[in-house]
Image: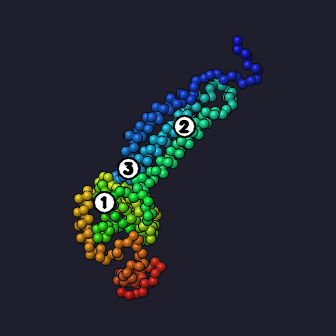
Amino acid sequence: MAAAAEPGAPPARSAGPNHGLRIFLWWLPAALAADLVIWFIWGPHLPPGAMSNSAASQQFDLRVLAVTGAPVLLGVLIFAGYAMITWRVRADDDEDGPPIEGNAKVQASWIAISSAIVLFLAAFGTYQLIAPAGAGAGEGPQPIWKPDGKPLLVQVIAQQWQFTYRYPQYGGMETTQLELPVGEPVQFDVTSLDVIHDFWAYQLGVKADANPQVNNVAYTTPEHTGEVTVRCDELCGLWHGAMYDYGQVVSVAAFQAWAHQTEVSMAKVTKTLPAFALIYTPNEIKGLASFFYQAGLPGAGGGYYGNQYYPNEP
Ligand SMILES: [Cu+2]
């Protein structure tokens, strides 16, 4: 015979349904379905695409982050929905409800799972930041992670408000066209002539600051042919928004043909350029003052350009 509850004592808790298991059984198929949709259907469309190895690596990162985050989000939403339905106030219920109690199992699992996810993401993020070779970000003048093989060198020179591209392996020619061969590692040497810009070749997953007096190196290997959108991604003055152009990834043969033809047709112009260097100081370019003089531009009467004085000498 069961002992009667003492008067005034809280009613004994009945062994009700296993809420944890019920929530888990709602959550498991939902999380599984969400992760499959994210990985296989949404994943291949995540930015920035897979045109280069660095872009593909960034897309992979976003897939992993989304697949990690979706089950957490669903866990919170399903728990909230379950709680609102199961533990809602019934029409004939005017009780306060039982006091909230601690639950060591729930707390320990929460801490353990959160810690595991955060530590995994920290390790994963650190690894992905350096592989492949700098992940398309500027590594500064002395990159630690370099791709295998001898890369095609492309110097990106930013200035208000355009990018030009210099190819030291093709006679140091400088063009406004970014042309790259598919399947070969590329080394971008990014610099600026004036203020801070940022070289962002979206489809290549390359983004590197262009700082004056600094050579900032970024690597990528294009894996598919196609068009590349290049944008300046650092507010750099009045026409910052107009500082963009379109590059091309083409077959190796098409690149070679373009490069040789451009090298020949630009030869006369290339001769007038300062010798190829990793950084340039516009103030020290010989003949600049006479250029200003001939063009009748400000400074034609002699004067300062930057912080250097140029006498009036044609
Ligand atoms: Cu800019």
x%, y% of residue 195? 45, 69
Quarter of the image containing the C terminus?
bottom left
Is residue 292 in view from this perspective? no
**Mark 1 falls on what kind of element?**
strand
**Mark 3 falls on what kind of element?**
helix
Dot 1 crowding, Cα within 10 Å, few <14, some 14–19, many 20+: many
Is residue 305 in view from this perspective? yes
x%, y% of residue 276? 35, 72
Q: Amino acid at mark 2?
A: Val
For the residues carrying marks 3 and 2, which lies nearer the camera in this image?
3
First reached walking from the N terminus: tag 1 or tag 2? 2
x%, y% of residue 198? 43, 63
First reached walking from the N terminus: tag 1 or tag 3? 3
Instruction: Work out which residue is located at the far right of the displayed protein and give it.
Output: 7
137, 178: nearer the viewer = 137
Q: Is residue 200 left or right of residue 269?
A: right
Dot 2 crowding, Cα within 10 Å, few <14, some 14–19, many 20+: few
Dot 3 crowding, Cα within 10 Å, few <14, some 14–19, many 20+: many
Quarter of the image containing the N terminus?
top right
Which residue in the structure is indicated by mark 1? 180
Q: Give the residue at x 62% y 22%.
A: 15
**Mark 2 falls on what kind of element?**
helix
Q: Amino acid at mark 3?
A: Ala
For the residues carrying marks 1 and 2, which lies nearer the camera in this image?
1
Q: Is mark 2 within 8 Å of ligand 1?
A: no
Which residue in the structure is indicated by mark 2? 76
Q: Is mark 3 within 8 Å of ligand 1?
A: no
Q: Give the residue at x 50% y 44%.
A: 120
Q: Is residue 199 above or below residue 46?
A: below
| Residue 56: mark in rendering | 3
Structure colour scheme: rainbow
